[in-house]
Image (cartoon, helix red, strand yellow):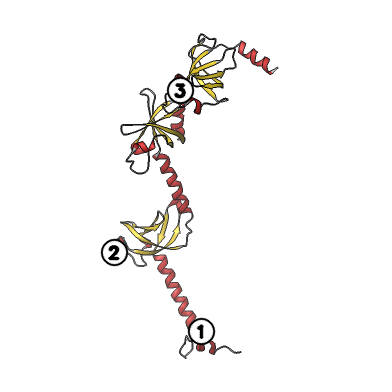
């Protein structure tokens, strides 16, 4: 019954030149690909009509069972098959897909095909995309050739169908990952912890302290000293080593206090004085083993 239903569906189906149809790959060879179109005739795509990507390999990149969308070029190629072009379909469907990637800020993987002036080329949805050298990495890239053949995660940053312009960026993805890693490290910092760091910059509103491991925090001017200061530079200089207390990590920012460390130290001193007064006598206090054991009754 299932085969009969397919035949019945095919008998009512009309395929015209220019239509974009999909089919399942049933054969792959160096000459091209054969598709099952759920129709009386099979679809064929010549190897040259599969992709414009110079790194594309029909034997390596196409497999039986793959579903491919292609444009009908001829209803009969002379051998009873429907001639199709995946390249032509990409010119229609590909631009819609890359525009969607742009709108949804989708991370996609591409393979660098070749170097060009000031960047490299990678194909996405069958469309030639340009990755500027400045968008390949977070740091300066000296040799573009080292990227040829590499797979990169990228964002689509420019789509201009009329001008056939597609621009991609790996740097944007790397920046996002770096920010996620930094935010994770910040989240691991426990409020109340006392840390040591170096003053890396001074602003009118406070000082930024380098805590190491790529982390830095702000000591607001109100948290610098127990005494009122007009500017942070009155008591701090770039390069100073300071002890700071973590106040909070709200909004992925570390708020610090130098004053809180000083307050804690004063509290400890007061407690020590009270303890000393409670247990002291008019006699002098010794620290030898004999002095420590003298008051113990056996």
Q: Is residue 122 visible?
A: yes
- N-terminal of the pair, mark 2 or mark 3, is 3
Query: Quick check: marks 2 and 3 in contact, CB under 8 Å?
Result: no
Work out how far the residue at label 1 is from the one at label 3, CA to CA, in angstroms.
87 Å
Give whichever of 231, 288 is nearer the camera.
288
* Helix, strand or loop status at disc 2: helix
Per the image, the residue denoted by label 2 is 234
- N-terminal of the pair, mark 1 or mark 3, is 3
- How many C-alpha atoms fall within 10 Å of the one at disc 2: few (<14), some, or many (≥20)? few
Per the image, the residue denoted by label 1 is 279
The relative height of residue 233 versus residue 29 in the rendered view (above or below) is: below
- How many C-alpha atoms fall within 10 Å of the one at disc 3: few (<14), some, or many (≥20)? many
Per the image, the residue denoted by label 3 is 90
Q: Residue at x 59, y 14 (%)?
A: 39
Residue 166, horizontal then vertical, whole percent: 38, 29
**Marks 2, 3: nearer the viewer:** 3
Work out how far the residue at label 1 is from the one at label 2, CA to CA, in angstroms.
42 Å
Residue 85, horizontal then vertical, whole percent: 47, 18
């Amino acid at each position: 019954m299932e085969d009969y239903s397919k035949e019945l569906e095919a008998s009512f189906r009309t395929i015209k030149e220019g239509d974009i149809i999909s089919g399942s790959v049933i054969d792959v060879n160096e000459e091209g690909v054969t598709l099952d179109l759920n129709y009386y005739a099979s679809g064929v795509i010549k190897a040259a009509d599969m992709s414009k990507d110079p790194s594309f390999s029909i034997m390596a990149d196409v497999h039986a069972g793959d579903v491919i969308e292609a444009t009908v070029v001829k209803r009969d190629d002379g051998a009873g098959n429907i001639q199709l072009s995946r390249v032509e379909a990409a010119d229609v469907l590909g631009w819609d897909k890359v525009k969607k990637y742009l709108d949804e800020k989708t991370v996609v993987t591409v393979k660098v095909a070749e170097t060009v002036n000031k960047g490299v080329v990678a194909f996405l949805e069958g469309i030639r995309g340009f990755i500027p050298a400045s968008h390949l990495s977070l740091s300066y890239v000296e040799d573009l050739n080292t990227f040829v053949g590499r797979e990169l995660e990228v964002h689509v940053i420019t789509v201009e169908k009329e001008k056939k312009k597609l621009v991609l960026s790996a740097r944007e993805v790397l920046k996002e990952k770096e920010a996620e890693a930094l935010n994770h490290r910040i989240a691991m910092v426990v409020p109340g912890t006392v840390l040591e760091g170096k003053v890396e910059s001074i602003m009118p509103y406070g000082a930024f302290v380098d805590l190491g491991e790529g982390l830095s925090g702000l000591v607001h001017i109100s948290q610098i000293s127990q005494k009122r200061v007009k500017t942070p530079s009155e008591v701090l200089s770039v390069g100073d080593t300071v002890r700071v207390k973590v106040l909070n990590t709200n909004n992925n920012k570390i708020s610090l206090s130098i004053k809180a460390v000083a307050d804690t130290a004063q509290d400890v001193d007061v407690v020590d004085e009270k303890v000393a007064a409670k247990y002291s006598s008019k006699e002098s206090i010794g620290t030898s083993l004999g002095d420590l054991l003298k008051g113990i009754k056996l």
